[in-house]
Image: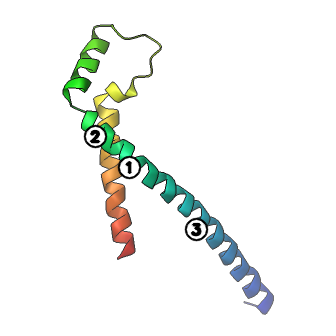
């Protein structure tokens, strides 16, 4: 590798690193922000309120145009599971 090639390559490494660190910092800030919402969602999921909402949806009592992914058992379970796995990955990354 010539001197010019080396400097050009290292400059690319610098640019890639700056971009990745900036993106990760933004993503971590957003991830931290939603953790309280995910705790609320976990408390709601499977609660009496959730069961009533689910049953009312099954009975057609809710508006047809209401977004209701939260009443899907799989969507909430999968999100909470993925969140837990991501937390493990973050911990393992630091060690």
The residue at which mark 3 appears reads as 21
Instruction: Give the x, y percent position of residue 59.
Output: 28, 8
86 vs 3: above or below: above
Mark 3 vs mark 2: which is more N-terminal? 3
Q: Which mark is residue 47?
A: none
- Distance of label 1 from label 2 (alpha carbons): 10 Å
Disc 3 to disc 1: CB gap under 8 Å:
no
Q: Quadrant of the N terminus?
A: bottom right
Density class for disc 2 (Cα within 10 Å; few <14, some 14-19, many ≥20) is some
Instruction: Give the x, y percent position of residue 90.
Output: 38, 65
In front: 15, or 26? 26
Disc 1 to disc 2: CB gap under 8 Å:
no
Residue in view at x 34 percent, y 49 percent: 82
Q: Quadrant of the C terminus?
A: bottom left
- Distance of label 3 from label 2 (alpha carbons): 30 Å
Density class for disc 1 (Cα within 10 Å; few <14, some 14-19, many ≥20) is few
Residue in view at x 73 percent, y 87 percent: 6
The residue at which mark 1 appears reads as 35
Mark 3 vs mark 1: which is more N-terminal? 3
Instruction: Give the x, y percent position of residue 2.
Output: 77, 91
Colouring chosen for the image of the structure: rainbow
Q: Find residue 75 and report its image quarter.
A: top left
Instruction: Describe residue 47's horizontal placement relative to residue 40 as left or right.
Output: left
80 vs 46: above or below: below
The residue at which mark 2 appears reads as 42
Density class for disc 3 (Cα within 10 Å; few <14, some 14-19, many ≥20) is few
User: Dot 1 lies on which element?
Assistant: helix
- Distance of label 3 from label 1 (alpha carbons): 21 Å
In the picture as drawn, the residue positioned furthest to the top comes out as 60
Q: Nearest to the eye among marks 3 and 2: give it.
A: 2
């Amino acid at each position: 590798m010539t001197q010019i090639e080396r400097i050009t390559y290292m400059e690319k490494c610098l640019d890639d690193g700056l971009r990745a660190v900036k993106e990760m910092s933004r993503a971590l800030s957003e991830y931290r922000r939603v953790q309280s919402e995910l705790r609320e969602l976990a408390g709601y999921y499977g609660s009496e309120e959730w069961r009533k909402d689910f049953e009312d949806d099954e009975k057609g009592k809710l508006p047809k145009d209401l977004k209701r992914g939260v009443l899907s058992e799989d969507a909430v379970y999968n999100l909470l599971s993925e969140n837990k796995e991501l937390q493990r990955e973050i911990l393992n990354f630091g060690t």
